[in-house]
Image (cartoon, coloured by chain):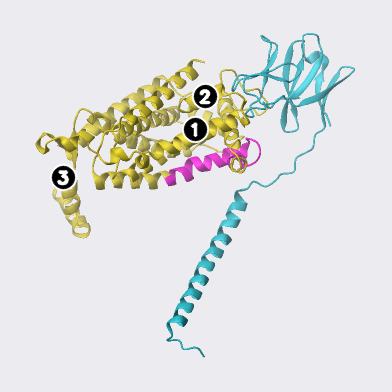
Amino acid sequence: MKPTLQKLYAWVDERLELGDLIKFMAKKYVPVHRHSIWYYFGGVSLFLFIIQVITGILLLMYYKGSEELAFESIQFIMSKVAFGWLIRSLHSWTANLFILTTMIHMFSVFFERAYRKPREMTWLSGMLMLFLLLGFGFTGYLLPWNELAFFATKVGTEITGVVPIVGKPILQFMRGGDDVTGATLSRLFGFHVAVLPGIFTVLLGAHLLFVNRQGMSEPLHYADTPEKERKTMPFFPNFLLRDMLFWLLVLNVLAILAVFFPWELGTKADPFASAPEGIKPEWYFLFMFQTLKYIPAKVWIIDGEVLGVLTFGLAGFLWMMVPFWDRKSSRGEHNRYINYIGLFVVMYILLFTIIGWLA
Amino acid sequence: MPDISDPNVQQNKRDFLRYILFGGVTAWLAAVLYPVMAYLKPPKQAEVVVNSVKAGKVSDFANDSGSIVKFGNKPVILIRNPKGEFKAFSAVCTHLDCTVSYRKDFGMIWCACHNGKYDLNGRNVSGPPPRPLDEFRVTVQGEEVSISKIS
């Protein structure tokens, strides 16, 4: 270290006692086993979050959140602002990769039973963040105010409206009225850039704090593995360097996607136009959308939509609560039903997403 | 004068203070939350009540076609069937609020969002829509086509 840096370090160290922190960092170890690769997906999600914050703030410099100007302002960003096309494309592509990596992260944690005691709170905070991400996707999708987004938002908000009792007030709250209008755009814009990021940041802070406090989860079979056969790697610098190599790879993939497959803007929303052919929600909502298509209008005395929405809601809730009903894993025993349930859910999502994609 | 060193009196005093504190906090929360909730509820805006609109001239609409007409702030679909007769329905799909269109290839009203189909009388015949489209009255006076609400 250069003397000036050393002096600066000494100055800070004198006040904050960094020594303890460094000792803590040096003691952090990451278990090495055949499923270690999954540890990287949490980190890369964090990286994508940082990209979203930066590109999101950059977009805010030119974006105008109103019915008359939203579409035009994005046209302006993409055609007039230097590198505007790149920033906007990056933001859209990163959003999609972000949801993909968090889903991989979530499923790997599920199959590894890393949610088991004592990491229930880490799992809960992660699941809440995943739900918030879907909220980010939904609210951000409307902001360009194009045809696809307009109808997707109509359908998405109308679906919440079918939930008994609370549905209607929530629908009006989200739309800022009875219909999807400029008022809806203002509200979703506010959620997208202020409310959701605020909550997300708090949850992310808690999530990272828990992970650092408890260390990485070890696989179940470690309990029977003799101490000296449990391989580990220091977090700093070995794991961190690998983490950053992966980040670099992802950044390259993003750059390729953003440059060679720029995100389309489509045509401006017109409340007096028919829904265009081939309308579809974003891929991460596709499996639910496709399921709703198959449920008949009435099942016994219940509306098809109500049944679909309540079933997905209940399934999501049970999934989030897995650390509390999977007692076996918390006791360190192998629970094969978790594999069956997890595989069923993964297959279901994959199958219905593919059908929805091809339809 | 009650004896203030009596434990019962002390307990009463504590209870009293607890009620005041609890009641005060509740009242304060209500005073904060009520305006916030009321603020979030979008105000009712006066809408111009439209009972009838002029859609255009008969010659503007080809046989076997459908067009969206603005009816106040709602879309209405005006259908001219292959025989040249006019029908009009609310263009808002009864399923999930999408705007329907006319499909010449199968001679039906169709919603792109979830593949809902209605026949040319507005009846839901296939897909998820739970009920028929609301019908509007079409009047042709000379060359002029107008649409009005059926009251």
The cyan chain is B
Secondary structure at badge 1 equals helix
- Is residue B149 visible from the viewing direction of this image? yes
Q: Which residues are magenta?
A: A171-199
Give coordinates of residue A346: x percent, y percent.
39, 25
Q: Which residue is mark 2?
A: A291
Mark 2 belongs to which subunit? A
Answer yes or no: are tags 1 and 2 on the same subunit.
yes
Q: Residue at position x 29%, y 43% from top?
A: A117
* Disc 2 secondary structure class: helix
CB within 8 Å, label 1 to label 2: yes
Q: State the residue at coordinates (86%, 20%).
A: B144
Front position among marks 3 and 2:
2
Considering only order in the chain, which callout, 2 or 1, is on the residue closer to the N terminus? 2
Question: Chain A shown in which color?
Answer: yellow
Closest to the observer, A214 or A260: A214
* Residue A17 position within the rendered picture, expressed as x and y whole percent measured from the top left: 19, 57
B48, above or below A152, in the image: below
Q: Report the predominant secondary structure element of the magenta stretch.
A: helix
Where is residue A6 shown, x and y percent of the image?
15, 51
* Disc 1 target residue: A312
Q: Please state the horizontal and vertical placement of residue A8, each as a whole percent of the image.
A: 19, 53
What residue is shown with label 3? A26
Report the Cα–Cα distance between label 1 and label 3.
44 Å
Work out how far the residue at label 1 is from the one at label 2, CA to CA, in angstroms: 10 Å
